[in-house]
Image (cartoon, grey):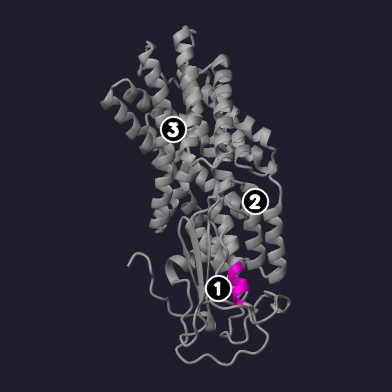
Amino acid sequence: MSEQHSRHEPEEPADEVGRARPGARAPWEPERSATPRSGASPWQDRLRTQLRFSGHTASIPIVPAPEKPEAGPSVPRVLDLALRTGELLLASGEGGEDVEAAMLGITDAYGLERCQPNVTFVAITLSYQPSLVEPPVTGERVVRRRAVDYTRLDEAHQLVEAITRSELTLEEAYHRLADIRRNRHPYPRPLLLLSAGLIAAFASVMVGGGPIVAVAACVAALIGERLAQLLAERGVPEFYQFVLASMPAAAITVVMIKLGAGINPYAVVTGGLFALLPGRALVAAVQDGLTGFYITAAARLLEVFYLIVGIIVGISIVLYIGDQVGVKFTVEGTFNLNGNPRFVQLLAAGAVSLTFAVLVQVRRVLLPMAAAGGAVGWAVFQVLREAGAAPVLATAVATGLLGLLGQLLARWHGTSALPYVIPAIGPMLPGSAMYQGMLGLALGHTDSGWRSLVNAASLALALAAGVNVGSEAARFVLPSPPPRTGREMRPASKRTRGF
């Protein structure tokens, strides 16, 4: 990661930084109200409210600031802690609004109330200006590596919670953040590799595959995942990793059709798609777009686009080669939700979410919740489909329910909602529609191919939007942030987004 750059160096040694006590403030800061700033509602919702409605920066006094006494918060150190925490959250897939809320919660807890955060897809900036007659202190960090580890994300949220509750000094918070970064991943690499294969196996069962198809899908996903790891170890861009990772499933499908195995080989490549589709990045992109972080949302969507194009390229190459050697493909009948009994599909959906949770490094204690969430979401989707609802509507309603439940559980435990929500939506990723679209294009059926791809895109957006709607609905269930009173009541600053 790049170094943080500050326009000012710390004037006080690190051990002279004051503890973030309830009501603590820098001596030159305006007096605050005795109203507690945390405990009445989660810090995410309290700070989201400041970001969205009342302006997240206090008004800067026009008069010259008074002389600062010797003791006071080390401004660059506080900014650096907030930036490093925000970097960890953003790299783990957290939305831009929650990253800003976390940084503001940290700076506010240590007495810096007039901070301006700015979050984009690759960079985080945080600026503090004590008054109009003093120059601002600005820090920046660049996010270059994005490692998915929801255990680490959970610990980072708990760190922010402890800071906003005034439980840690600045140095204690630094040490705890360092411990979070040094912590080992909860699952070994062989188990993560096996999880990718099991996702494909259980997903193939969901779309009508039998035991032989499940084994073939698992083997194909294991080969693809290992090939992608080899490219990643050599620094090859992620686009080419997805191209290569998608080929084994398509190749096994071609071989099974050529040999006339008498089974549904299309479920092999469909199951492989479930293990590759970037659902986590898509959810984050839609969330950022709906909350006004358009630059970050556009960057995330572009990332999703390139990864999906890589998958399409890899599978299309193999399907084209198969067509040239005489393999006869059919677009119709490649996907059958009725191929297995309902309870088998339900168990497979729960297993997909369980293995997905292992792949994104969810804490062990949350694995049963992930499996239950996947089964519940799939059951709701199936009930709505049998009632005649369109796939897009059924997907949106099911994921909206998962988003609501995930947010409520996350707020109850004081952590992020991603470990609860992202694994649970795995069974509803549009793998079948995407495969039908790619197959249609590879066989020259342009119209039907593009229709299937548009349908896949609609399902993906419905999935992501449903998660966001459910998350927002949780705000109506949770208690509202406490109102500001006394000297804390300040006129809202002009908003920088939307006007």
- Name the amino acid type tagged 2: Arg
233 in relation to 54, above or below = above
Residue 179 visible in this rendered orientation of the protein: yes
Q: Which residue is mark 3?
A: 311
What secondary structure is the magenta-colored segment mainly? helix
Bin the neighbour count of mark 3 within 10 Å (Cα to Cα): few under 14, some 14-19, many 20 and up: many
Image point 50% across, 57% down: which residue? 475
**Residue 176, position in %: x, y?**
71, 61
Residue contact between numbered discs 2 and 3, judged by CB atoms under 8 Å? no
- Name the amino acid type tagged 1: Ser
**Residue 171, position in %: x, y?**
71, 70
Which is nearer the N-term, disc 2 or disc 3? Answer: 2
Secondary structure under the numbered disc 2 in the rendered image: helix
What residue range appears in magenta? 75-80
The reply to whether the magenta stretch includes residue 322 is no
- Name the amino acid type tagged 3: Ile
Image point 50% across, 18% down: which residue? 252
Bin the neighbour count of mark 1 within 10 Å (Cα to Cα): few under 14, some 14-19, many 20 and up: some
66 in relation to 415, above or below = below
Residue 6 disc label: 1
Bin the neighbour count of mark 2 within 10 Å (Cα to Cα): few under 14, some 14-19, many 20 and up: many
Check the image and name the residue furthest to the left: 447
Q: Quadrant of the N terminus?
A: bottom right
